[in-house]
Structures are given as C-alpha cells and as structure tokens.
Amino acid sequence: QVDLVESGGGLVQPGGSLRLSCAASGSFFSINTMGWYRQTLGKERELVARIKEGGHTDYADSVKDRFTISRDNALNTVDLQMNSLKPDDTAKYYCNMVGYYSDFRSFSSWGQGTQVTVSS
C-alpha cells in the first residue's frame, strides 16, 4: 500500500501564490507518474499537472505558465508551485502517484486532498 500525504493548501488572495507538496510512503519499487488533480463540487476531477519519472510534464491549458510541477525521486515527493492564482483555481487538490510494486503489480494512489481557496 502506498500512502500519500498532502500539505500546503489554504486561502489566498487573487494574484497570490501557494505551494502544494505531496509525499509518498510505503513499500514500492518505482513511481512512474506523479500528478495533481483538482475537483470542485458537482464537477469531475480534472488533471492540473503531471510529471513522469524522466521529467516530462503535462499541464492543463488553464494553468500553463502559472503553475509548475516538480518531483524529487529520492524523497518520493511532488510539489506544485501555483502563481498568479485566480478564483477559478479554487478547488480541492488531490495528489496522485502511479507506479509498481516489486512484484510488478501496478498501483495508483490518491491523497486525501487539500483545499485551495482563492478569494479576496
């Protein structure tokens, strides 16, 4: 089992910045993809950004040039630096990691979510 713990959410004014962090714990062989998703009430969870083990990144169009995802493979952590935040960024943000156990079974683990509220 892979457990994810997120931190860094909160209330911020429009134009402000927040940094989300997520750390994995447990027994696993590798983590291929680390990502952040977000969800608001009544809407489906959507991809915000993800990063592959080799460093390739994908971003939602709505956050390009404002958000930056990064990972530390030694610490099994992923961060999301969010700048120029807008009210539309208000959502619960979830960390997701996809990888393999030592017996080659795959896993996809989710964190509990951290609330980000952008409001004046």
Image: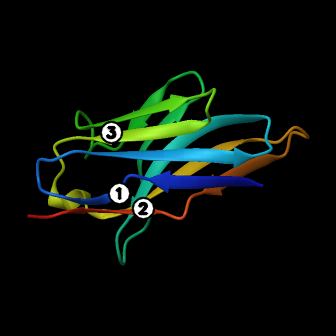
> Which residue lies under the disc numbered 2?
114
Left or right: 56 in relation to 32: left
List x then y, in percent, for residue 28: 79, 41
CB under 8 Å between callouts 2 and 1?
A: yes
Q: Is residue 36 above or below residue 90?
A: above
Q: Is residue 115 above or below residue 103?
A: below
What residue type is disc 1 on?
Answer: Gly
Of residues 52 and 120, the one drawn nearer to the viewer in this rendering: 120
Q: Secondary structure at mark 2?
A: strand
Q: Secondary structure at mark 3?
A: strand
- Local packing at callout 2 (Cα closer than 10 Å; few below 14, some 14-19, many 20+) is many
Distance of label 3 from label 2 (alpha carbons) = 14 Å
Which label was assigned to residue 81? 3
Distance of label 3 from label 1 (alpha carbons) = 11 Å
Between discs 3 and 1, the one toward the N terminus: 1
What residue type is disc 3 on?
Answer: Gln
Left or right: 50 in relation to 32: left
